[in-house]
Image (spheres, rainbow, N blue to C red):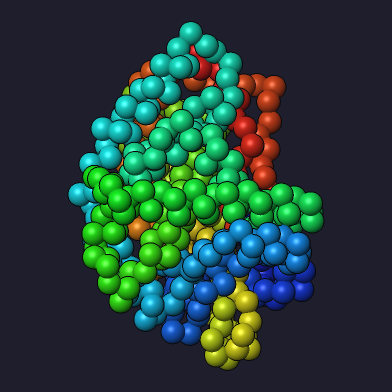
Amino acid sequence: MYKVLGEARQSEPVFYSPELDYWVVTRYDDVMSILRNPSVFSAANANTPVAPVPQEALSILDEGGYALEGIQVNCDPPRHDRIRTHVSQAMGMKRLMALEPHIVRNVELGIKNLQGKNRVDILKDFIYEFPARVIFSLLDIPESDAAQVKAWAMDRALMSFTHSSKNKQIDGARNLVEFWNYCVKHVQKKMLNPGDDYVSDLLAVRDGDDDKLTLNEINSAAFGLLFAGHETTTNQSTHLLNALLSGDGLWQQLVDEPSLIPLAVEEGLRMYGAVANWRRRAVEDVTIGGMDIPAGSGIVISFAAANRDPEMFEDPDEFRLDRKNVRKHLTFGNGLHFCMGAPLARLEMKLLFQTMTREFPNMKLAADEEIDFVRAFGFRAPKSLWVDLQG
């Protein structure tokens, strides 16, 4: 993927893909320009399914009461500004930092479950559920539901970002209805019995006023967080671990100098961002990188390509722990739609890798196992990562 995108960035940095029916933008400056101009480039199509959804699946969603609304990541001003202003009151740094004890506890629990083992699929046996349990702490959802919610989240990803078969889309629609109703019931429960959690905070901010937030926007916020709030962190952590164990001496550097871990997290975000591509739609006729793009056209902004643009990052295909401008990567977006969960994701990965380098200093990739990925439009999701914990 990175090689193909690199060739495109050099020879045809903005091009039309008939297969996707999207314009693809690969240069850092062009991607940044799009992110910084929401009045020209709408985000409303960011989560639109990449493949047509069969009528049978649409009927299941409609009859099941599936009423997910675009909020924050896939809506535009002025509605976006209203929602983000009020949601940010519930998702402030104080709320996120209060999760640190929960993160540490879940990391230690995962490490405990690995003790005495050597060869493991560390994605399945540890990383897969860890970020979900953190989000559950934020939402006050039983940890016993982790596996089910992860399965629902995968259904959402498959329906929105892959070319699934008709039967898979129909099955996915049934599961999405269950997922949606789970979130709606959780919000209803918090209306009756508020607590110290994100949904209760959203309801308090709303204070019965639909001009601030509607109930369905809160339902959608809970649904969105239960999907994107952990799936991307799972994938990102797995990518980073694979990169560190693949690199010459990188893991040992972090074992010897744990203070480098935050830089490793940022370099992993830059080089192997879990969100590889995102979407916009041109509101008006516009020129990007010398190419005239008609109003109404779909646009793919390739974070994977932009984050390896040599005009921005020196030696972009090398994993470097001394990169001065590493936090200029675009994996969390930029501008109005910058990811609100970025501080939490950074904290989770920092604490995760601090613990893993301490507990498993000799960890190595399993020599006879290969990493494979889910085929998806916007995300790079590993299916497994086999390691030898003791080397």
Residue 157 placement (x, y as % from top left): 60, 52
**Residue in the picture at 50% in, 80% down:** 41
- Residue 378's image quarter? bottom right
For residue 374, side relative to residue 352 (left or right): right
**Residue in the picture at 29% in, 58% down:** 202
Task: Say if residue 114 shows up in the picture.
Answer: yes
The residue nearer to you, when weighing 311 against 15, is: 15
Work out which residue is located at the far bottom of the displayed protein and give it: 285
For residue 375, side relative to residue 304 (left or right): right
Residue 162 placement (x, y as % from top left): 69, 56
Does residue 161 lie above or below 294 as drawn? Answer: above
**Residue in the picture at 30% in, 76% down:** 211
Residue 78 placement (x, y as % from top left): 37, 81
The residue nearer to you, when weighing 135 against 243, is: 135
**Residue in the picture at 67% in, 74% down:** 22
Does residue 19 lie above or below 175 as drawn? Answer: below
Work out which residue is located at the far top of the displayed protein and give it: 116
For residue 181, side relative to residue 59 (left or right): left
- Residue 320's image quarter? top left
Work out which residue is located at the far right of the displayed protein and give it: 166
